[in-house]
Image: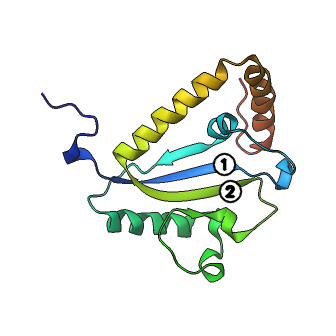
Amino acid sequence: HHTQTSGDGDDRFVVVTRTYPTTHGANRGRTYDKAHMIFQTDVEVSKKSFATYQEAVKHALEQRNDSCWFDGYEEEIKPHAPPWDSSEMGNCDNDEDQNIGVMKRSEYEAEQAQNELFVEKARQGEMFRSTLRDLLYVKQITKAGRVHYS
């Protein structure tokens, strides 16, 4: 039987965009442990997948050009293959930075699974839960413009 998960025929390239909190801007002086970083990172995967790495990179480039995080990126940094990270521009006013990369769907799925496991382990610690409550509250305020009221 054939399952719809990442069998080789279906293991195409996707563009993965991560938006994560910085340790400057409004978050100056904060450090995040890995679990909180995972928890606070918004991950978007391109709806379209690509047969070749080159096609995916082309799509990633369009996405980078459309992203306000990467305004003026090319001029400041010599071209290199993705992942591209807006933190390379050293804009210390950003409360968040963005990372755009290309990976195979199977790699992405494996990474997500590992992250979920990691967060699950950390979540079992009581300290994580109380900090999480604070973070969720902070996250609601800092995402001004897209505040979600529960």
87 horizontally vs 14: left or right? right
Q: Secondary structure at mark 2?
A: strand
Q: Which residue is mark 1?
A: 20
Residue nearer the viewer, 108 or 136? 108
In this view, 149 is above or below 110: above
Q: Which residue is mark 2?
A: 97
In this view, 68 is above or below 146: below
Please tell me in which quadrant of the rendered image residue 121 appears: top right
Mark 2 is on which residue type? Asp
- Point out residue 3 in the picture as x, y percentages from the top left corner: 21, 31
Residue contact between numbered discs 1 and 2, judged by CB atoms under 8 Å: yes
In this view, 131 is above or below 139: above
137 horizontally vs 100: left or right? right
Q: Secondary structure at mark 1?
A: strand
Please tell me in which quadrant of the rendered image residue 130 appears: top right
- Point out residue 53 in the picture as x, y percentages from the top left corner: 33, 63
At label 2, counting other C-alpha atoms closer than 10 Å, the crowd grade (few under 14, some 14-19, many 20 or more) is many
In the rendered structure, which disc, 1 or 2, sits on the residue that comes first in sequence? Answer: 1
In this view, 81 is above or below 139: below
Quarter of the image with the C terminus is top right
Measure the alpha-carbon separation of dots 1 and 2: 6 Å
- The residue at the point 51 percent across, 74 percent down is 80
